[in-house]
Amino acid sequence: MPKLKTHKGAKSRFFITGKGKIMRTKGGKTHFRRNRSKTARRLYDNKLEVDKTNIKQIKRLLPGV
């Protein structure tokens, strides 16, 4: 069997924790961020768990991770 290649776009967007959860960051972090309130800006620093409906797709894109 040939090697399975990692999807580089998914690799930059998602990471897997030690317990196996797939985490993501929010989109829209850079453009017009200075216009938002400080509370809203802080929300972009948090990592969120990926929805359970997308886990199967993301694991297929990240075979070696």
Image (cartoon, helix red, strand yellow):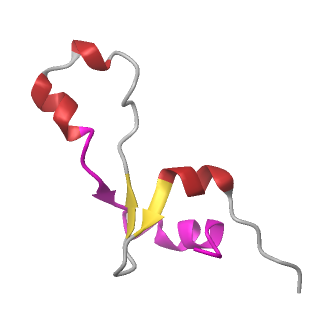
Residue 14 image offset from top left, x and y in percent: 48, 58
Residue 25 image offset from top left, x and y in percent: 37, 48
- Give the residue displayed 82% in from the left and 77% down from the top: 3
- Vertical order, 23 against 4 (above or below): above
Q: Decide which of 2, 57 is in the foreground and name it.
A: 2
Q: Decide which of 50, 30 is in the foreground and name it.
A: 30
55 in the magenta segment: yes
Residue 7 image offset from top left, x and y in percent: 68, 59
| 57 left or right, relative to 24 | right
Which quadrant does the N terminus fall into? bottom right
- Give the residue displayed 35% in from the left and 43% down from the top: 26
- Vertical order, 22 against 39 (above or below): below
- Give the residue displayed 26% in from the left and 15% down from the top: 34
45 in the magenta segment: yes
- Vertical order, 46 against 42 (above or below): below
Q: Decide which of 57, 31 is in the foreground and name it.
A: 31
| 10 left or right, relative to 32 | right
- Residue at the farthest bottom position: 1
**Magenta residues, as a range?**
44-65
Q: Quadrant of residue 28?
A: top left
Which quadrant does the C terminus fall into? bottom right
Residue 54 image offset from top left, x and y in percent: 47, 65
| 24 left or right, relative to 12 | left
Q: Quadrant of residue 53?
A: bottom left
- Give the residue displayed 12% in from the left and 25% down from the top: 38
Please count the marks in the image.
0
- Vertical order, 39 against 1 (above or below): above
- Residue at the farthest front position: 18
